[in-house]
Amino acid sequence: MKLLKCAILSLAAALTFSGCSDNEKVNRSFFAMDTYMSVTAYGSGNQQAVNNSEQLVISLENLWSVTKQNSDIGLVNSSDGNSTVVSPRTAEIISYAKDMNVRTGGALDISLYPVVKEWGFTNGNYHIPDDARISELLKYVNAKDIAVKDNWVTLRKGMMIDLGAVAKGYAADLIAEQLVSEGVSSAAIDLGGNVRTVGKKPNGEKWVIGLRSPESDGLFGTLSTDETAIATSGGYERYFKSDGKRYCHILDPKTGRPAESGLLSVSVIAPEAKLCDALSTALFVLGADKAEELRKSLGGFEYIIVTDKHEVLVSSGVFDGFELDSSCSDWKVTKI
Ligand code: AMP
Ligand code: MG
């Protein structure tokens, strides 16, 4: 599955950078946070800045990995109800995730980790927990019970957190910030489907971002855009099948079970990648109607949603930049 993702990302990158000849492209691709990542900038002098992006991601992974016992998250999760001092960046991202939990009506909840683990999505030992086990574990799920004060984080005893739904978007923003501070004016960052572009392409053309098909190795469409961020969440990224039924890795915190909102994938477009990452996961849980309600009430983002009926719902702010791939010509595109 990871190799497949890599192929798609390179295809997207090829599309993104096609047609440019007036400025040399420098790139670094690497594997971190359990996914393939790629940072590309224009300007031959920018190789070091691009390389530094990998170092930044590695340092964030060391802080946020849920499997490293000595990471900030590892220490918080083994704190047994006691307060843990973490780095300012960790305190910041946990506060942000708490905030997004409120803004999404609880659909994004980083304290779902014990339930995600029980289903086997963390190590591939998949199984369907019984109702009693899910109810028991849900007692420890509620992002509002995570306390963050200065750089101290306290969980209610028994709780555990995982930043998997927000870390890559957050990291993409930090990379963009770092690249700009190092003098880069034109770049594209792709952290496992969390994309952030910096500035304009040197030839003045728009960025063209490939949107991965939830059902094949190809793309279902492209988005032409100015500087932006975009993240995609989908059930196809990690799932298992039992008795012919598909169980995906994005869970509904209300039920402790895989989200069944009738969607195949959700791409969210906004200026910041952290918002895109948090919202793409949350909207996948909430479904199309609530996604639109949230766009109206929260504002500040657009979406491209693929439903399980092959309807592509494109919100008005990105409709003009969206183009359906010819391989999906029987899919119905609707402007929302
Ligand atoms: P993403 O790929 O950004 O949509 O994040 C999905 C990952 O976040 C999953 O693999 C789980 O580890 C975790 N997760 C699943 N459901 C949720 C949820 N409702 N809120 C927060 N994290 C979740
Ligand atoms: Mg996410």
Image: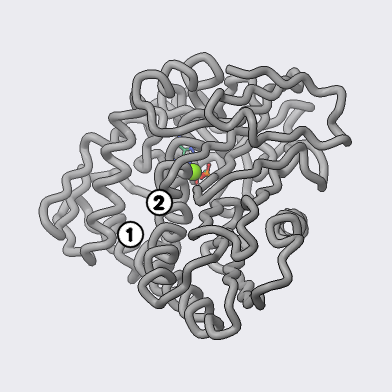
Checking the image for residue 163, the label placed there is 2
How packed mark 2 is, by other alpha carbons closer than 10 Å (few <14, some 14-19, many 20 or more), is: many
Residue type indicated by callout 1:
Ile
- Residue 144: x and y in percent read 23, 34
Residue type indicated by callout 2:
Leu
Which residue appears at 43% of the width and 66% of the height?
A: 175
- Mark in the foreground, 1 or 2: 2
Q: Quadrant of residue 304?
A: top right
Q: Is residue 268 left or right of residue 11?
A: left
- Residue 148: x and y in percent read 16, 49
Query: Counting residues from the N terminus, which is met first, the one under dot 1 or under dot 2?
Result: 1
- Residue 216: x and y in percent read 82, 41
Q: Does residue 152 lie above or below 51 as drawn?
A: above
Q: Does residue 333 lie above or below 31 as drawn?
A: above
Label 1 to label 2: alpha-carbon separation: 8 Å
Asked whether disc 1 touches disc 2, contact meaning CB atoms under 8 Å apart, the reply is yes
- Residue 306: x and y in percent read 67, 27
Please, what secondary structure does the residue beneath circle 1 have?
helix
Q: Quadrant of residue 323?
A: top right
Which residue appears at 75% of the width and 39% of the height?
A: 213
Question: Where is the C terminus found, in terms of image quarters?
Answer: top right
Q: Is residue 62 visible?
A: no
Checking the image for residue 73, the label placed there is 1
Q: Is residue 167 visible?
A: yes
